Amino acid sequence: MKRIALCLLHLTFLALCLTSLKAQDVLQYVQPLSGTAPSTTVAAKKHSAAGSEQKANTIPAVGRPFGMTQWVAQTNPTETKCLPPYYYNDTAISGFRATHWISGSCMQDFGSFTITPVVGKLKTDIKQYAIPFSHENELSTPYYYKLNTKPVTTEITSTLRCAIIRFTMLQDDSLYVLVIPNSDYGEGSLQVNPLSGEIEAGNPAHRIYQGWGQPAGFSGWCYLKVEKEISSSGTFNGTEIYTSNIISKKKNIGGYAGFYLKKGEHLDIYMGTSFSSAEGARLNLQTEIGKKHFNDIKEEARQEWQKALSAIEVKTADERSKRIFYTAMYHAMQIPRLYNDVDGMYPVFAHSYQFNKLKKGDYYDDFSMWDIYRAQLPLFEILKPGLINNLVQSIILKGQEGGWMPIFPCWNNYTSEMVGDHTSAFIASAFNKNIRGYDVSEAYRLLRQNAFEVPDREAYIDGKGRRALPSYLKYGYIPMEDSVPDAFHKKEQVSRTLEYAYDDYALSIMAKALDKTADYNDLHKRSFNYKNVFYKEAGIVRGRYAGGAWAESFNPDVREKYITEGTPRQYTFYVPHDVHGLAQLMGGRKALENALDSLFIKDEYWHGNEPGHQIPFMYNYTSSPWKTQQIVREILNREYNDGPGGLSGNDDAGQISAWYIFAAIGFYPVDPVSGNYVLCSPLFDTIRINMPEQKTFEIICHKKNSTDQYIHRITFNGKKYAENYIRYSDLIKGGKFEIWLQAEPASWGADMQSQPPSVTR
């Protein structure tokens, strides 16, 4: 009986532990304010250009994963490029914005609206109604925001497209609610209907980069509904106040609705948004919120975020690491953005106020593709392949509607922003992982067009097609003579060459699988074009003229005009598809290792920008994989923190955050197209990845001390695992991955047979 009792006690304890793990409230670890202040990390201070590069540019957004609109307290009233609506160091709040800010970017807000409470006398001058605030009075979570200010408290919760904003009075007084379409171009419109308690407003979107300043061909729309009787209403233009309830096409316009509330009384504002019409915003509100109350939506939002964040469950005694990890998960789920209404209506890509209705699925835009193809999108190839299908289908639809496959689609338009053509990499990555719920032949047709054809002049100026493709095809690299004038990022010839070589490799994977033999042969050959800008005397990439001569300006550790946002030394390692080939160019695996050592010894690794994100994992292609384990751990500890300045540069739609997620759980997609993930030592004791169809991949770390970080043994489902990478095809089946860590470096994964393949090998 005693043995039975002990057994029962043990089972009860085990059940309690499992219940505790399962019920872990991961939302408590999310810190939305992280990244809203200038970076305090080491690399950011050294390598970032002054200004926006030193800021993560995230915002403490209330929303749903990948939703249409986020809601945020507003400290910056404009939609200006590189200025997010919220900065931690600002001291005054001027309202609460329905925002379409691309999280972590240096881009622009668009189609946004600000809702501002004004207590007492009606004021429409921002200098008069902006109020001081303290972070001590601020509660920020992914699903709920609260700010206590005198004399009104504000609370916000939301759905995918809608929100409820609650103002609670701290004294008996008049409350005016200002509604402001934030059109920097003075093109907004607004109408107040005091009898029905409704306000409608529009804010036309505009392009930047290619077509800068041109209309984007759609507007942000909002529809507001209040249940209380409006006692007074009107519109305003700056400080000029009108009794008219309609206003449009002037700068600094807005509308107001007045109420009288008792102390403790609250006013709930129900707000729908849309990119199609005010009626679409109304329909979204009726469908997503309907007759539900504030606390109903708040609880639904809490549950959705809890489920989304729990896709990866981690266990560790290090609470700081959990805060950073789950904040990174939150940041990685902001973009791309949902664009269609609940009935499927969406703005046609690259057209002027034309709309279509989807037959199935959802339509997404705002792809910061140069950034997110590396790790953020690959993360959801594991966690949400259904979402990836939707994203790929959205991009194909853009190519069909606009005539060319977009390279960096934002504001539902062509931009030709940054360098490379990484739509190819993203779609090839999904295709190679058998995520194919879309028209594969149509995807290939459009991607091939970008890789082999040149649009006419008008289309090219509009942002269609690869930049400098004729030069690239003629020389096998982009020479210094081609300054790439028709691009926001001009010149940067070496970086373009390197990234086109990767994109050609990506498309070659599809071509081979689809039996496009001639295309495959051409693309495969072009994937080696990185060699054409490799300066062997220094072992570093360098600008080159059409005749073959090397550029006079060559400073390995200084930003050169032929390099994108970095230095020649940093960009030398951008050959993710052929690391073994790069090693051969350098003189072998040892030479590659020495080159990597040199970068880190000189402190030239810059984590705050994307082109080098694969570099710390490249030691797995040398005889010293332990250096990857060491350096990745250093970066996790040094370049991320859990305070407002805790990100090392622009988070760029979640890419910096996704790097942390992958590195912390012990693997990273150096070459995301390949489906291989390079291993490193996990930060946590146990990790559970919850995938579709109830499959789980469990990682268990065995170590004597909490600081042990070097791998000396791995088993997969109980069998010895010798490779220093893992395949997507194995990971998604689920299983148990056990890693034994020790205090000193080991020889695990050092032989070539254990290392990931490349194009060369």
Image: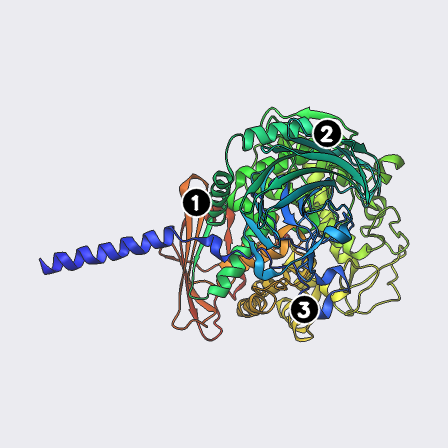
- On screen, residue 268 versus residue 316, left or right, reads right
Picture layout, residue 378 above or below residue 13: above
Residue 366's mark?
A: none
Q: Amino acid at mark 2?
A: Val
Q: Position of residue 360 (x, y in %)?
A: 58, 26
Residue 348's mark?
A: 2
Q: Amino acid at mark 1?
A: Lys
Residue at figure coordinates x 71%, y 26% from the top left: 355
- On screen, residue 711 versus residue 250, left or right, reads left
* Callout 3: SS: helix
Residue 610 position by quadrant:
bottom right
Q: Find disc 3 in the rendering and name its residue.
A: 43
Q: Find disc 1 in the rendering and name its residue.
A: 733
- On screen, residue 243 versus residue 66, left or right, reads right
Residue at figure coordinates x 66%, y 34% from the top left: 231
Q: Nearer the viewer, mark 3 or mark 1?
A: 3
Q: Earlier in the sequence, mark 3 or mark 2?
A: 3
- Return the residue nearer the eye: 393 or 92: 92
Distance, label 2 to label 1, CA atoms, is 38 Å
Distance, label 3 to label 2, CA atoms, is 41 Å
Q: Position of residue 210 (x, y in %)?
A: 83, 43
Picture layout, residue 317 above or below residue 61: below
Q: Please say if the residues under marks 3 and 1 sit with CB atoms less than 8 Å apart.
A: no
Residue 438 position by quadrant:
top right
